[in-house]
């Protein structure tokens, strides 16, 4: 079963985008671009901070 976790191997800041990309099976760069677009309206920044706090790392389960 797949779990949504922060990536320890594909990370730039906290590994949130890398973890979401691995979970969805898409490139993490696409997820990062989506966060940049949403960040322009400040919704993406709030979501990223919440995800960085709440998501576990992939080696913690």
Image (cartoon, helix red, strand yellow):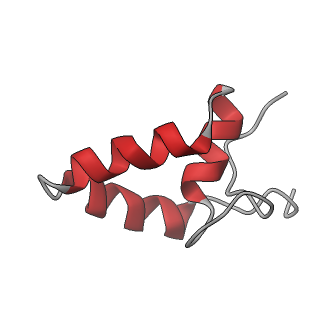
Q: Position of residue 21 (x, y in %)?
A: 62, 38
Q: Residue at x 23, y 47 (%)?
A: 38
- In the rendered view, would you say 35 is above or below 14? above
Viewer-proximal residue among 4 and 30: 30
Q: Between 31 and 6, which is closer to the camera in this rendering? A: 31
Residue depicted at x 81% and y 56%:
58
In which quadrant is the N terminus drawn?
Answer: top right
Could you say where residue 9 lies in the image, as x and y percent from the top left? Answer: 80, 60
49 horizontally vs 43: left or right: right
23 up-or-down from 15: above or below: above
On screen, residue 20 above or below 2: below
Looking at the rendering, which quadrant does residue 46 occupy? bottom left
Residue at 57% x, 57% y is: 16
Does residue 50 appear left or right of residue 22 in this picture? left
> How far from the left and from the top, in percent, is residue 8?
78, 64
**Residue 31, position as x, y percentages in the image:** 48, 41
Instruction: Locate the C terminus by quadrant.
Output: bottom right
Q: How many numbered discs?
A: 0
- Say which quarter of the image contains residue 50: bottom left
Instruction: Choose between 45 and 50: the one closer to the eye.
Output: 45
* Of the pair 7 and 54, the residue shown nearer to us: 7
Location of residue 54 with respect to 29 vertically, above or below? below
Q: Is 7 left or right of 13, judged from the image as shown?
A: right
In the displayed orientation, state which residue is furthest to the left.
Answer: 41
Residue at 15% x, 55% y: name it.
40
């Amino acid at each position: 079963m797949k779990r949504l976790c922060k990536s320890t191997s594909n990370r730039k800041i906290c590994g949130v985008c890398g973890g979401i990309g691995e979970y969805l099976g898409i490139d993490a760069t696409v997820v990062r671009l989506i966060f940049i677009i949403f960040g322009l309206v400040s919704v993406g920044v709030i979501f990223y901070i919440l995800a960085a706090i709440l998501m576990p790392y992939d080696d913690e389960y």
